Image (cartoon, helix red, strand yellow):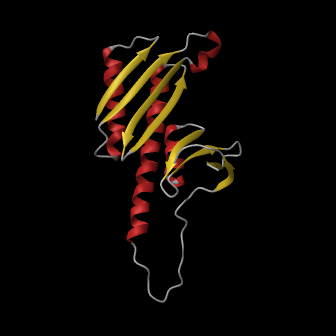
């Protein structure tokens, strides 16, 4: 995996850069085709933010999805370790979902057995708003929303060929905004 390290308001030595490349590279072991990862390390100089002085953000592409994690700590090493742990968790979660989705499609139905339908979408959309916007499947959009760590995700819905938005509600559930 090609790891690109960027810094903002902070200088790092070569040994720390090598540590970043090694740790992020090892985290990418879940996918063979993860070609690159961008790591941005920044320092907040505001003394009130001392517990979150250093911030590490890792962005990578895997299996057609963008994975982004962010972590902050009082030292660069702490922030890096927390970010790498979250990065591994996100990659593991993505891999498990992709594997379970492909296995669910391959299993033939058993004759005589009652049809058990598993929902294709493991996320419950609890609120729908109508809004003029753009489209993609809701499951993939929610997955992207989680991987990016954002509160909303604008996408083109493959089912309707219209633009839609999924968003995270304050109660932790998901919402879908569809065009009118």
Q: Is residue 124 above or below residue 166?
A: below
Q: Looking at the figure, which quarter contains the N terminus? A: top left
Using residue 128 as the reference point, say whether residue 153 is left or right of it: left
> What residue do we see at 37% from left, 70% from top?
106
From the top left corner, tell me how far across and down residue 159 is, in percent. 50, 58
Image quarter of residue 170: top right
Q: Residue at x 54, y 44 (%)?
A: 134
Q: Is residue 24 above or below residue 121?
A: above
Percent position of residue 10, x then y: 44, 11
Q: Is residue 145 left or right of residue 36?
A: right
Percent position of residue 53, x then y: 55, 17
Q: Where 98 sits versus 67, above or below?
A: below
Say which residue appears at 50% left-offset and 47% top-offset.
Answer: 156
Residue 177: image location, x then y, percent: 63, 47
Q: What's the residue at 63%, 43% (across, down)?
A: 168
- Left or right, 55 with reference to 22: right
Q: Nearer the viewer, residue 98 or 24?
A: 98
How many numbered tags mark residues here?
0
When the figure is inspected, residue 78 is found, relative to residue 170, above or below; the finding is above
What residue occupies the far bottom of the structure in this picture? 112
């Amino acid at each position: 995996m090609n790891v690109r390290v960027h810094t903002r308001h902070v200088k790092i030595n070569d040994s720390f850069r090598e540590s970043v490349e090694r740790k992020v590279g090892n985290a990418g072991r879940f996918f063979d085709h993860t070609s690159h990862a961008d790591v941005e390390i920044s320092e907040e100089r505001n003394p009130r933010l001392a517990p979150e002085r250093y911030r590490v953000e890792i962005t990578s592409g895997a299996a057609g999805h963008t994975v982004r994690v962010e972590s902050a700590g009082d030292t660069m090493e702490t922030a890096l370790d927390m970010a790498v742990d979250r990065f591994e968790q996100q990659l593991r979660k993505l891999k498990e979902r992709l594997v379970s989705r492909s296995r669910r499609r391959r299993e033939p139905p058993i004759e005589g057995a009652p049809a058990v339908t598993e929902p294709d979408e493991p996320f419950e959309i609890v609120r729908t708003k109508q809004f003029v916007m753009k489209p993609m499947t809701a499951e993939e959009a929610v997955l992207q929303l989680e991987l990016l760590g954002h509160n909303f995700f604008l996408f083109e819905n493959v089912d309707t060929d219209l633009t839609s938005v999924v968003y995270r509600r304050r109660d932790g559930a998901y919402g879908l905004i569809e065009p009118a």
